[in-house]
């Protein structure tokens, strides 16, 4: 029986904008992919589609290995704060660019630099854009005062897309990480990546 090894790593970083002017030596992730709302009714707070950025594995031996990072950025706690949030990059994908600088620099476990990230630099690296305001946990149907609370649907839709179109169904190793509110995402939804099991016929094992 083939196993997927799923590691959950929680980081606490302060959020900075999705896309900034690239500085010398700064690392980014490109390839923004917005996920159609037809997938599970996925939507940011303002109704725009959620999405992710991805850097493909740099060599064949790492092609079945994935680092998936859930972006942080706090929560909104009532209609007024969520309405305000829906006007910015943490509640809407309108302003998302083709590349992201993560938290100012896509370094650490997301880095493509073998010198600073010797174990994971060649893996597929995925940054999950955060636009629901509740750590990918909202699960209300319809709209409420014009807002969409579809965080769980967003996560599931992105995983569906990755499984169907980006090779996640063939994964041998997955590290599911998050920063701040994204760190909470790994605790709330660690069971989500176990969908790999049903989708690909592999057995998942989890480590912390």
Image (cartoon, grey):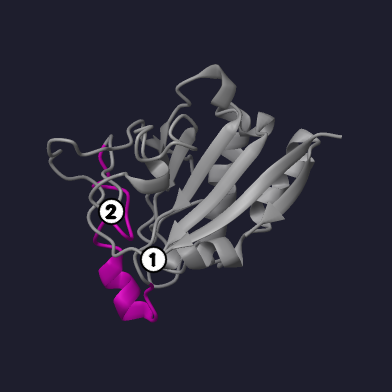
The stretch in magenta equals 75-97
Quadrant for the N terminus in the image: top right
Regarding residue 39, the answer to whether it shows in the image is: no
Residue under the image location 46 percent in, 58 percent down:
178
Q: Residue 25 appears at what percent x and percent y?
A: 18, 36
The vertical placement of 25 against 40, above or below, is above
| Membership of 166 in magenta stretch | no
Q: Which residue shows up at 24% across the image and 62% down it?
A: 87
x and y percent of residue 91 in the render?
A: 33, 60
Q: CA distance from mark 2 to mark 1?
A: 11 Å
Q: Write down the residue under mark 2.
A: 103
**Residue at x 20%, y 39% (from the top left corner):** 26
Q: Where is residue 207 shown, x and y percent of the image?
A: 67, 56
- Foreground of the two, 83 or 191: 191
Vertical side of 15 occupied by 110: above or below: above
Residue located 54% across and 66% down the image: 137
Q: Residues within 10 Å of mark 2 (few under 14, many from 20)?
A: some
Q: Which residue is mark 1?
A: 12
Q: Residues within 10 Å of mark 1 (few under 14, many from 20)?
A: few
Nearer the observer, 32 or 181: 181
């Amino acid at each position: 029986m083939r196993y997927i090894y799923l590691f959950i790593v929680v980081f606490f970083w302060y959020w900075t904008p999705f896309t900034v002017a690239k500085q010398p030596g700064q690392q980014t992730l490109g390839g923004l992919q917005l996920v159609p709302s037809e997938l599970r009714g996925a939507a940011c707070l303002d109704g725009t589609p959620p999405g992710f950025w991805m850097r493909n594995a740099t060599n064949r031996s790492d092609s079945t290995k994935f680092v998936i990072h859930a972006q942080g950025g706090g929560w909104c706690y009532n209609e007024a704060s969520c309405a305000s949030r829906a006007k910015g990059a943490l509640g809407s994908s309108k302003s998302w660019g083709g590349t992201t600088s993560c938290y100012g620099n896509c370094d650490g476990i997301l880095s493509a630099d073998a010198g600073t990230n010797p174990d994971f630099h060649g893996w597929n690296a995925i940054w999950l854009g955060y636009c629901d305001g509740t750590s990918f946990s909202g699960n209300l149907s319809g709209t409420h005062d014009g807002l969409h609370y579809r965080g769980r649907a967003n996560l599931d839709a992105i995983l569906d897309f990755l499984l169907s179109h980006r090779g996640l169904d063939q994964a041998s190793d997955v590290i599911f990480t998050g920063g701040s509110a994204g760190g909470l995402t790994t605790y709330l939804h660690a069971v989500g990546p176990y969908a790999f099991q049903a989708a690909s016929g592999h057995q998942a094992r989890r480590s912390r």
